[in-house]
Image (cartoon, helix red, strand yellow):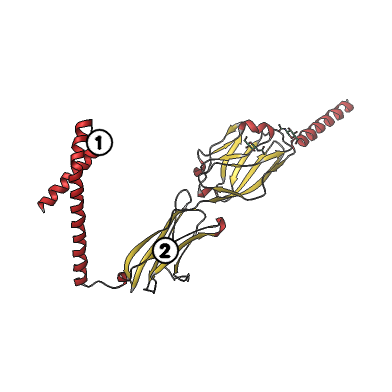
Amino acid sequence: MKGTQLHCLCMILLHLLHTAGSERFEVLGPTDLIVTVAGDDIILPCYLKPNISAEDMTVDWLNLDFLDSRVYRYQNHRVIRDDQIPSYRGRTSLFEKELWRGNTSLKLTRVQGTDEGRYKCFIKAKSWYDDFTIQVLVKAVGSKLVVSIEGHREGGMGLLCESEGWHPEPELVWLDSEGVHLSAGPPETHRDFKGFYTVKLHVIVQETDTNRFTCRVQQSRINEKMETEVHLPSELFHHTSPLRMAFIVLCCLGAVTVIGLSLAIYCIRNKKGVIIDQLKRQRYDLKKEKGKYCLQIITLLTLC
Ligand SMILES: *[C@@H]1O[C@H](CO)[C@@H](O)[C@H](O)[C@H]1NC(C)=O
Ligand SMILES: *[C@@H]1O[C@H](CO)[C@@H](O)[C@H](O)[C@H]1NC(C)=O
């Protein structure tokens, strides 16, 4: 009797040892930083060694840079969508047909700025677990620099430089024609809900020999740099007197008249063609529109 009990116990112990042993695995992935470009689809690699099946395990993907870090969970053969970070909704999946060979890589589509971070691939079996952490950098080069002239400011000329759609956050500087940094206001940074940065920088410049100023945006981590130069006519720096203003207004009016007249001539020449076109096609098309505008311009001119 005792013998069989002992035998039984031994069998159970052996069985436990065996199952524990057979479930022992390592979780592996890339040790290098993964650099991705915003908008791309990427795979975050993660797999079991030995390559046993993960179909009956729990696979968790976490972004450690979030407080509630759940990116994805696979458990009891199902995807669990509760507690998922909202910005990942609809953009994550496992390769479920690859799970049986221990491939637990995560597919992430339409990468955005908020996706940057440290990702933990955490895999748990009944009596064993392991994890691996990978680092993802999201790269987005922003829009061309836009410079606007804001007018007279505190004895100089106010300029504004801006660029949008960057990741990581870039640095913006104003330089004079010799490449010397100009002291500018505090940079204004805005981060949109996808994690992309818009940056703006105001500066007040004084008249110089060249009146050339450069705005530069750079992000050294992704090795990107853009510049744009503005040239301000020196008249801009001088306050305009009323007389001067009147002169400028007259000049503008003159220019408008010349443009109007040339337009009218162009229209009259074109009108013939338009009428023939109309007769030919009997269809509403662009040229008809043009003809209408021309007639309006001519009426306006005659009214004048
Ligand atoms: C698992 O790994 C072994 C050796 O590394 C390889 O020969 C085998 O094809 C792999 N099995 C699967 C299903 O990928
Ligand atoms: C896992 O599966 C995906 C999709 O087939 C493949 O691209 C990736 O290379 C696989 N990873 C490993 C480690 O086998």
The one of 113 and 65 positioned closer to us in this rendering = 113
Q: According to the image, label 2 marks what residue?
A: 229
Q: Residue at x 52, y 45 (%)?
A: 111
Amino acid at circle 2: Glu
**How far from the left and from the top, in percent, is residue 7?**
86, 28
Q: Residue at x 27, y 72 (%)?
A: 239
Q: In front: mark 2 or mark 1? A: 1
Query: Which secondary structure lies at badge 1?
Result: loop
Q: CA distance from mark 2 to mark 1?
A: 42 Å
Name of the residue lying farthest toward the right? 3
The one of 204 and 254 positioned closer to us in this rendering = 254
The one of 37 and 114 positioned closer to us in this rendering = 37
Q: Is residue 176 above or below residue 59?
A: below
Q: In which quadrant of this rendering is ligand 2 seen? A: top right
Crowd tier of the residue under label 1, counting other residues whose Cα lies within 10 Å: few below 14, some 14–19, many 20 or above: few
State left or right for residue 269 relative to residue 115. left
State left or right for residue 237 relative to residue 229. left
Q: Residue at x 65, y 47 (%)?
A: 133
Does the beta carbon at disc 1 come under 8 Å from ligand 2? no
Looking at the rendered structure, which numbered label has been put on residue 217? Answer: none
Amino acid at circle 1: Asp
Quick one: label 2 or label 1, which is nearer the N terminus? 2
**How far from the left and from the top, in percent, is residue 143?**
44, 53
Q: Residue at x 16, y 44 (%)?
A: 295
State left or right for residue 285 relative to residue 200. left
Query: Which secondary structure lies at badge 2?
Result: strand
**How far from the left and from the top, in percent, is residue 3?**
89, 27
For residue 128, say whether it is visible.
Answer: yes
Q: According to the image, label 1 marks what residue?
A: 285
For residue 282, say whether it is visible.
Answer: no
